[in-house]
Image (cartoon, grey):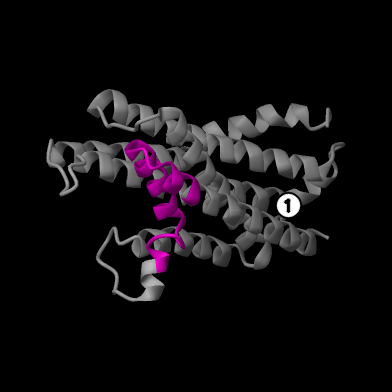
Amino acid sequence: MTNVLPTLRFTVLRLIRNWIVLLLLLGIPIVLITFFALILGDSKTEAGMPYIQESTTFMVLAFQLFGGSIVMSYIHEDFFTERRFRIQSLPFNQTLYAFSISVLGTLFSIFLGGILVFYSFWVFNVEWGNIGWAVFVIALMALLSSIVCLMFTFAVKQFKVAERLSEVYGIGAIVLAGLFFPMPENAFFEFMGSYGNPLTLASAAIFEYQAGNVAEVWLNVSILLGAIIVAFFVMLALGRRRMG
């Protein structure tokens, strides 16, 4: 473990110097939040919720769907390219090193999500209810995204294919949530637009918390946690097969 500790600083520097990640997961969301705040103003939904509150919540959570790309890119670079020979020659535990990349990448995604929460709260007075709870839900989304993206990385040998699959995961969740256009009214799309969709589960966990519906809050969070646990064991199995 101690041999891996010196690599943590290096990994953190890689993360904060990755301007593409900062642009996609921080810069673009800030621009979109600002744009919609100016356009929507004080208008409200039929339920009385400000449109800016609803749209910002969905946006912050939606971008977490793509946060797993951070982890998958570094794992691929360090373990599935020519760089792996250099990594393998270093005197530290390779498994712990991969774990540290996964943890730090996920924490970085959560950190960026937290910045978006505080930005929208301080600049546009977006109501998040309990901010600690909102960040917890964001953390669940970030963790699930990292695990799912690692599943794709281990499942296919072509990294470009894994990247496209991660995009399908993220964009698919957004589309099935009905954020682009209404989905057909049948059992499949109703399920994928509610309990079968990480984006709608996470948003419901926040909205229901604000409304005080404790039972619905824990139902949505429990499903998210269940998905994380199942995906984690699938990822472990795929990882052992690929790296073993």
Q: Which residue is more in the foreground, 30 or 127?
A: 127
**x and y percentages locating residue 65 in the rendered image:** 46, 51
Residue tagged 1:
79
Specify the amino acid type for callout 1.
Phe
Image quadrant where residue 239 sits? bottom right
**x and y percentages locating residue 146 in the rendered image:** 58, 49
Measured along the vertical axis of the image, is residue 19 above or below residue 225? Answer: above
Q: Which residue is more in the foreground, 31 or 116?
A: 116
- Residue at image x 60%, y 30%? 13
Q: Quadrant of the C terminus?
A: bottom right
The answer, for residue 218, to whether it is visible in the render is yes
- Residue at image x 42%, y 48%? 216
**x and y percentages locating residue 51 in the rendered image:** 20, 43
- Please, what is the dominant secondary structure of the magenta stretch? helix
Image quadrant where residue 12 sits? top right
- Residue at image x 37%, y 33%? 116
Does 244 sit left or right of 99 as displayed?
A: right
* Magenta highlight range: 191-219
- Residue at image x 50%, y 64%? 164
Does 75 sit left or right of 68 as displayed?
A: right
Measured along the vertical axis of the image, is residue 165 above or below residue 116? Answer: below
The answer, for residue 66, to whether it is visible in the render is no
Measured along the vertical axis of the image, is residue 140 above or below residue 12? Answer: below
Q: Quadrant of the N terminus?
A: top right
Circle 1 SS class: helix
Residue 196 highlighted magenta (yes or no): yes
Circle 1 crowding by C-alpha within 10 Å: few under 14, some 14–19, many from 20: some
Residue 54 highlighted magenta (yes or no): no
